[in-house]
Amino acid sequence: MQATAPFVPPTDLEPYVTADGSVSLRSAALQEGYHSVHGALQESRHVFIRHGLHAVAADPLRILEVGLGSGLNLLLTLADEAVPDRTVHYVGLEPFPPPIALVRALDHPAAVGRPDLRAAFERMMDAAAGDRHQPRPGFTMERRAAAVLDLQEQATYHLVYFDAFGPRTQPAMWTAAVFDVLYRAMVPGGVLVTYCAKGDVRRTLVGCGFHVDRPPGPAGKREMLRARKPIP
Ligand SMILES: C[S@@+](CC[C@H](N)C(=O)[O-])C[C@H]1O[C@@H](n2cnc3c(N)ncnc32)[C@H](O)[C@@H]1O
């Protein structure tokens, strides 16, 4: 088998405007963006909020994000209308955080229509501000510099936002080694959602024990993947 080259995080990130007007980050060297060119906001809302957050009823709700990046999924979760009534613990894994100046430049709080959340959001995204946050009563956020393979927890998370770079850019993220770790970290009945709809990824998830369905994809994509850890 051919060895996969180690992933080299991008150092040339630049903001770019996606088709719905929301701004994301892109690396020319990787030829990869943090979100879909068809719209960062519509993609995050569709994949992670509509088919993830709104499909899981647990309260308290423990969410793990793999690839916190610029924090758009975190902000949409904090801003979601259904969430204030629930207790949420959000853990964001990000070993290569983008500079806070770039995160500020994207101004996700304006794109989401919640400029009132700007200060709390920027504090959570700023490594210098510490790792544990409570942006509102009942919502805690922990930012970890750990990579997904370092995750030790078992039967902890009800919902996983799997928002890694795509399989072409970072194939090691889409392997059984990673999905086994996530399977162990999830509670029975827990749900993992991702924008990726590739057949090999679906088969790898099934091989790890998940039940997988393919909801319709966000704009520009026919399908996405949602994987549920079965209840024994
Ligand atoms: C598609 S971007 C995430 C976009 C992000 N959710 C947002 O809203 O901006 C993928 C992210 O995965 C991160 N990443 C790379 N290797 C990782 C690893 N081993 N574990 C967790 N995250 C990783 C990258 O640094 C990058 O920020």
Image (tube, helix red, strand yellow):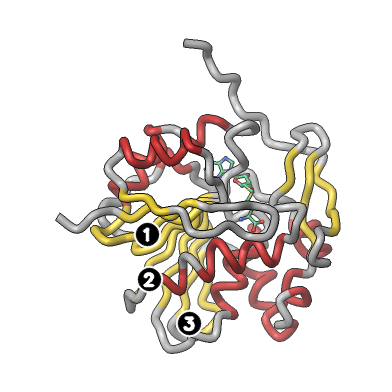
Which residue is located at x 49 percent, y 63 percent?
A: 142
At 71% across and 60% down in the image, what residue appears?
40
Please indicate, yes or no, whether residue 206 appears anywhere in the rendered image: yes
On the image, the x and y values in percent for residue 125 come to 65, 63
The percent coordinates of residue 226 (x first, y second) are 43, 55
**Corner quadrant of residue 115:** bottom right
Whether residue 135 sits left or right of residue 139 in the image: it is right
Mark 1 lies on a secondary structure that is: strand
Q: Residue 56's mark?
A: 2
Q: CA distance from mark 3 to mark 1?
A: 17 Å
Tag in front: 3 or 1: 1
Q: How far from the left and from the top, in percent, is residue 85?
A: 43, 89
- Decide if residue 187 is on the left or right side of residue 61: left
Q: Total of numbered circles in the picture?
A: 3
Q: Which residue is mark 3?
A: 83
Q: Residue furthest top?
A: 1
Q: Are marks 1 and 2 in contact (CB under 8 Å)?
A: yes
**Label 3 Cα crowd, 10 Å radius (few <14 / some 14-19 / many 20+):** some
The amino acid at mark 1 is Val
Which one is nearer the viewer's eye here, 196 or 66? 196
Give x and y (percent) for residue 182. 36, 47
Report how far apart the C-alphas of labels 2 and 3 lie in the structure.
11 Å
Q: Amino acid at mark 3?
A: Val
Q: Which residue is the site of mark 1?
A: 191
Mark 2 residue type = Val
> Against 91, is 117 above or below?
below
Residue that lies at the very extreme toward the left in this rendered image: 232
In the displayed structure image, the side of residue 183 where residue 200 appears, left or right: right
